[in-house]
Amino acid sequence: MKLEDILNKVDHTLLKQESTWAQIKTILDEAIEYHAASACIPPSFVKQAKEYVGERLNICTVIGFPNGYNTTAVKCFETEDAIKNGAEEIDMVINIGWVKEKKFDAILEEIKAIKASCNGKLLKVIIETCLLTEEEKIKMCQIVTRSGAEYIKTSTGFSTGGATKEDVCLFASNIGPHVSIKAAGGMNNLEDAKAFVALGTSRLGSSRVIKSIKGNAPTSGY
């Protein structure tokens, strides 16, 4: 597997609460240098980031992040605002409490509403696998397949765990052919990234993969 084939799948990510523009700019520069798929950054930086990178890089941002319990109206507004500010990709968090209450119709309608707010831009649905049972993960694979979203994503990186190989395999067995997989969190280096790609992952949400290539991978954090 060629290095560029891994890097082209990376959403180079910085979502820490204390992130500054100087740190975001570094992420953008690294993502451009290593030909990443996108840079995934907080919504408040999207407009400034898009003005900085122009057409050199896709800007991805997060909606309802990291807990997912915003109202649907708020999530749709966030999405519309992000697209207006220049985001090409949206990573939304589902309402996990609704999963526990089996409000699956409400979850489906919310994802559809946010997809409509994307105005044709790419939507990835974060289901936070570390908080779900296997049965709930399978149900979410089915819902995301029906929703029109392009991706199902494992994790925010802000809960009790990140992506696992077992969850990626579970996704691959239960999503429709038009849905792709994004693994996020739990990748420390290039070898980890290769392993996830080999299992069928099309996107990798990580701050560490590119930094590990540069030889300065952080010891902790998403």
Image: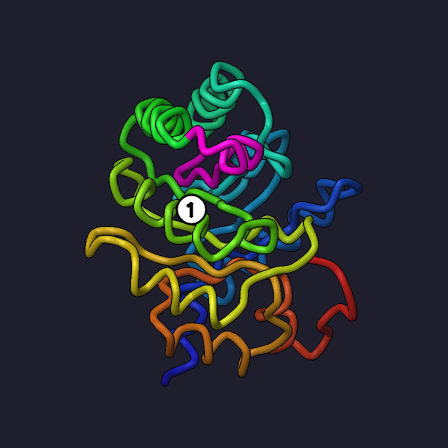
How far across and down, in percent of the image, does residue 141 sit? 35, 50
Pointer 1: residues within 10 angstroms few (<14), some, or many (20+)?
A: many
How far across and down, in percent of the image, does residue 104 sit? 39, 32
Q: Specify the quadrant of the image occupied by residue 116.
A: top left
Instruction: From the viewer's side, name the closer residue of 92 and 109.
Output: 109
Is 102 magenta? The answer is: yes
How far across and down, in percent of the image, does residue 177 sit? 19, 56
Tag 1: amino acid = Asn
Q: Secondary structure at mark 1?
A: loop
Question: Residue at 53% across / 17% down in the picture?
Answer: 74
Q: Does residue 50 appear in the picture of this structure?
A: no
Q: Does residue 131 appear in the picture of this structure?
A: yes
Start-end of magenta stretch: 87-103
Instruction: From the viewer's side, name the closer residue of 35 and 142.
Output: 142
Question: Residue at 55% across / 34% down in the picture?
Answer: 46
Examine the rendered structure and indicate whether residue 203 appears above or below residue 99.
Answer: below
How far across and down, in percent of the image, does residue 98 sit? 51, 31
Question: Residue at 61% across / 67% down in the picture?
Answer: 186
Q: Is residue 214 left or right of residue 163?
A: right
Residue tagged 1: 58
Image quarter where the C terminus lies is bottom right
Instruction: From the viewer's side, name the closer residue of 216 and 187.
Output: 187
Examine the rendered structure and indicate whether residue 178 appears above or below residue 50.
Answer: below
Examine the rendered structure and indicate whether residue 219 appears above or below residue 118.
Answer: below
Question: Residue at 61% across / 60% down in the picture?
Answer: 162
